[in-house]
Image (spheres, rainbow, N blue to C red):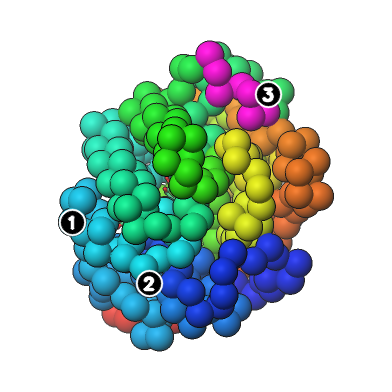
Amino acid sequence: MTTGGGNDNRGDEPGAKDSLVLVTGAGGFIGGHLVADLLRDGHSRVRAVDCKPFSEWYQRFPEADNRVLDLREIGACREAAKEAATIFNLAADMGGMGFIETHKAECMLTVLINTHMLMAARDAGTERFFFSSSACVYAADKQTDAQVTALKEADAYPAMPEDGYGWEKLFSERMCRHFREDYGLATRVARYHNVYGPYGTWDGGREKAPAAICRKVVAAKLSGRHEIEIWGDGEQTRSFMFIDDCLTGTRRLLASDIVEPLNIGSDQLVSINELVSIVEGIAGITLKRNYKLDAPKGVRGRNSDNTLIQEKMGWAPSIRLEEGMEKTYRWIHDQMVAREKGAAAE
Ligand code: NAD
């Protein structure tokens, strides 16, 4: 169940390969890939935690210590963190723009997970704690133009992040900082910019643009109705990072001495219209585009400034969108065909 990406030149987690590594949100997209990556890399004790029923996890590994726990509860966090030398805290109640613009309170309640996980990690003597923050922490007034100036880490302040989801992430970033300063917990914070790839959410309302566009193009291809609905005018811009780059950046950051929040994102800027064209190219079809102007669109433009990550790590995400989308499209295509036949594809 790999995406085919290697993990060469990765930093490694502190401590031995047999020290306990906890991944929260392991039933989700990035968490599932991270568990796979750690196991592939020889980690013998990986604890995987999510609140979803185990049968609904996107990737399942019997060799991991899999637990279904609701991490909003402090007791569950203590059980999860017990003996963990390293914690990757990825659990969050989140989704794409269609979800976060309409579920702000739910997104903010993730503060319970992040608060309780930090407390549990502090009390369990955890050596390294990773937190997945987001580009949604960046101030809205710096993202009003499609030809955006890429966001550098300092642009999060003065604070005016994405309502709900972004405020929670920014608050939890600061908690990580103060747990480091006040309690000596070694926290590392990544600001992920749109991550995509196989084994992620592709329907149901929480999916993000790359997966949603793949699904719509596959549906058009399978049905013969060569039309696509695009949210907004399609000229809004973003950058999208393939999951393999996300894993490399995550593990390198965890192993590094970089204590301030760091962008982990691609700087290949595209408009949504260009993204649709890429997927049309992969599918070998051209679709009539119908623009839904009142749909959730998010900010007008967003890109990752990778100066700091290059400077600190000598590395930055580089997998081309065309390459990553090809893999993502194929996987979603197979899922949809299998669903039509009444079975989930591997
Ligand atoms: P995901 O939704 O696929 O995975 C998150 C997982 O957390 C889900 O499986 C969910 O069931 C689990 N979860 C939610 N509430 C929980 C609870 N109370 N207890 C235990 N588990 C719980 O999302 P993802 O794309 O894998 O994102 C992982 C992390 O990265 C999140 O913190 C997210 O905010 C952050 N992030 C992701 C992106 C992206 O583009 N995917 C971008 C920026 C930041």
- Three-letter amino acid code at the position of disc 2: Arg
Q: Nearer the viewer, mark 2 or mark 1?
A: 1
Query: What residue does disc 1 label?
Result: 75
> Rounded to the nearest whole Å, what is the CA distance between mark 3 and mark 1?
44 Å
Crowding at dot 3, Cα within 10 Å, few <14 / some 14-19 / many 20+, comes out as some
Q: Quadrant of residue 223?
A: bottom left
Q: Residue at x 80, y 41 (%)?
A: 311
Q: Is residue 97 depicted above or below 24 in this figure?
A: above
Q: Earlier in the sequence, mark 2 or mark 3?
A: 2
Magenta highlight range? 151-158
The label on residue 148 is: 3
Query: What residue does disc 2 label?
Result: 47
- Asked if the stretch drawn in magenta spans residue 228, the answer is no
Q: Quadrant of residue 103?
A: top left
> Rounded to the nearest whole Å, what is the CA distance between mark 2 and mark 3?
40 Å
Q: Nearer the viewer, mark 2 or mark 3?
A: 2
Q: Is residue 6 depicted above or below 254 in this figure?
A: below
